[in-house]
Each structure stands twice: as structure tokens, then as C-alpha cells.
Amino acid sequence: MGVGIVAAFGLAPDGLLRDVPTQTIARQLSVPSLTPIAPVDGYWREERIQRGDTLGSVLARLSITDPAALGFLRSDASARPLYQLKPGKVLRVRTDNDGHLIALSYLVADGQLLAVDRTVEGFVARTIPPQAAVRVEMRAGEVRSSLFAAADVVGLPDAITLQLAEVFSGEIDFHHDLRRGDRFTVVYETRELDGHGSGAGRILAAEFVNKDVPHRAFLWRTPDSGEDYYAEDGKSLRRAFLRSPLAFTRVTSGFSLARFHPFLQTWRAHRGVDFAAPAGTPVHAAGEGQVALAARQGGYGNVVILRHSGAYSTVYAHLSRFAAGVKTGARVAQGEVIGYVGQTGWATGPHLHYEFRVNDIQHNPLTIALPNAQPVPAAERAAYLERAAPLAAQLALARGATLAGSE
């Protein structure tokens, strides 16, 4: 805003003007020195590879008119990967005002960076490790039809959406409990190579409001250098056991005290759950534990029995074979492959017979209340809360920005 000042002067009608003496003064002023503008050392530009592109067509779109550079790229063996351009990848070049090539970079198939540079002697091509960087992104959205549709609206990568469902799988049944109006907020890492996105990393913090009940999760490194997710109070969000040891399956025979056995052709109790799956399907350990048995045993056929902490044990029967390293006494992690579906023992077709035992008594694994994994140790609770506080603030920031944008 400009400010104007006006001064008014008046002379009396009979006032007299007196002569005012004047003096001319000349002074030599030095011209201030100006810092010269440094010439720009070329301009970086990039072009995404399209299907059917050749190196020549990509360089033409980048307005490179440099016969010396084109001759080098065609003849030098180190630059040969440039003739196997992959659609979707990016070629970056630095040129001067006349379209002469100064530098070029391209991520080749093995994840290395092919770099071409102009020197006083000519061009040099070399393969070097790319500059890696990790950025933190924040996204928030609202479920209207499905979780993946809501994630697409806000640009959340599919890998992060899958992580989000996995993180809260012990709290929310995403197949049955999801509701229109549910909200999510995510703080996550993205990886970059040579300035270009190379995929999503880990979720650092997340919030999911399901049926108006908020659930929050924060990433924390455990004492054994593992990573897991915990609630604001330090409670683990991971169940100590997976509900099913197979990724995708269907139940063919449930837990029952009276079932007609298809192999024995008689009525007897079925104190486990049978999951249908093709032979060779990987079977995962339902929880962390130690292999109590990995051998052939009667009607179970090839069976693995795992002992877990406390009074818990799990049984995996009719396996076609055991996974490498799975033998009596070995320790396994939750989710680790311990064997493969088969039909050994008393089985009329390929399937997995799975038992969940407490004090060696079988319980229905589909209905029993599964225990949570161990919380953040008391000795680390203060450090965990200190780490979670700024992540909670980021969640609030992303959530607030989304709510403000929807008004």
C-alpha cells in the first residue's frame, strides 16, 4: 500500500522574497562494483521412456543436437544399456543453450546408475551407485466404497495400503467391519534413486477410524533389531498368532466334535480345521516358536508341531514336504514358511490340517481369542513415547489438512 504525503505552503500577499546565497559543489562518486552473474552450467531435463522409443527418438524430444555425443553413445560399449530402454523409466540429460550434451544419467536394470559426462578429452561413461534418499509422505482419506478406492483418490501407493490393512488386521476385520465414512491417515516413507521415486517404504505412523473408534499405530524398533507396530500406550498391535497359516484359502472341514471322517469312513471328532489348497502351497508358522517335531507321524503324515511361549502349540499336518531348515529344535518366526501343502497320511486330497492347542488341548483356531504379542518393554516405554509424540503430531497435521480441504 502506497502512502502519499502532501505539504502545502502559503505566502502572505505582502511578503518579500529575499535572495538566498547558493554554492555549487561537485563530487566524484565511485561506481559500485557489481558481482558478475555466473554462467549457468547447463540445464537438467528428463524424458520418460515410451513404448517403441529408441535412444535417438528420446534425445530428439530433449532437443539434443550434438553429433559428437550421439557418435560416442552409439560406439562406446559402456553406454550399451541405453539401447535397451525400458518403458516407464526416465532418462535425464544436462545440456547447454545450444543443445550440446553435458551429462546424462539412466538407471539400468541392476539398479546401478549409468552416467555419461563430457570432459575436456571427450565423453566418459561409467556405472556408479545411485544417490539414494528417503522422504516422508503424509496422506489422509475417507472410505466411500472400498479401502483401495479411497487410497487411490489420495494417491496412496498400493504397497502402503496393504501395509495399512496388515498393521490394523488384529484390530479391524477389513473384510466385514469396513464402513462408509471410515477415515485413515498415514505417515510413510518413500524411496528415491537419483531423484526419482523407486517405491514405497515403511509406514511410520497410521490412524484408522473404524465405526467412529480411532485406532493408532506407531513403528518401533524392538531390542532384537526387529520392527513392529504399537498403540499409543505401547501395546502391541500384532497378534501373537495368525488366524490362518495359509494366505488364500477356504475351510473345507471345521472344528467339530462329530464329523464323518472321509478317510476312515466313520464318525469321530475333528479337533482342527482343514484348509483347502493346491499341493505345494506354502504353509506359514502361525506364531514365533520352536519346532518340537518335524517328521512323519501316523495319520498326520508329514507334520510340524511348534511350541510357542506359554501354554500354546500349533500343528500342521499332511504336508508334502518340510521347508529348508525346519527340523526339531529349530526356531521359526511368525509368518515363516515351514512346509508345503500335500496329502500325506490320512488324507483323501491335498489340504492342510491345522490345530491350535492350549496346554495340549485342541481349540477352534477360527474362534478362540488370540493373545497379543508382547508390549514395548517397560525400560523402553519413555523412549517409545518420545518417538511417538512427533509422529502423532504429523498424523494430526495430515488429518487437519484433509478436513479443512473437504469443507
Image (cartoon, grey):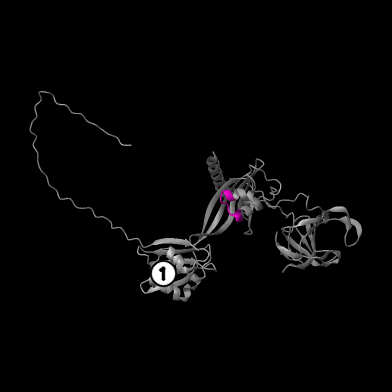
The percent coordinates of residue 29 (x first, y second) are 17, 50
Image quadrant where one finds the N terminus? top left
Q: Is residue 320 magenta?
A: no
Q: Position of residue 186 (x, y in %)?
A: 58, 49
Query: Image height check: is 18 above or below 161?
Result: above
Amino acid at circle 1: Asp
Residue toward you, 357 or 89 = 89
Image quarter where the C terminus lies is top right
Determine the residue located farthest toward the right in the rendered image: 266
x%, y% of residue 151?
Answer: 60, 50
Q: Which residue has dot 1 on it?
A: 117
Q: Quadrant of residue 329?
A: bottom right
Q: From what the image shows, is residue 285 above or below residue 176? A: below
Q: Nearer the viewer, residue 209 or 145?
A: 145
Q: Residue at x 46, y 66 (%)?
A: 57
The stretch of residues the image draws in magenta is 152-160
In the rendered structure, the answer to whether residue 394 lies left or right of residue 60 reads right
Q: Is residue 158 magenta?
A: yes
Q: Helix, strand, or loop for circle 1?
A: strand
Mark 1 is surrounded, within 10 Å at the Cα level, by few (under 14), some (14 to 19) or many (20 or more) other residues, namely some
| Quadrant position of residue 270 | bottom right
Does residue 381 appear in this view?
no
Nearer to me, 238 or 124: 124
Give me the residue at 92% from left, 59% from top: 266
Q: Residue at x 40, y 66 (%)?
A: 64
- Residue 11 lies left or right of residue 258; in this view the side is left
Query: Can you give x and y, in whole percent of width and height, for residue 121 in the image?
Result: 36, 74
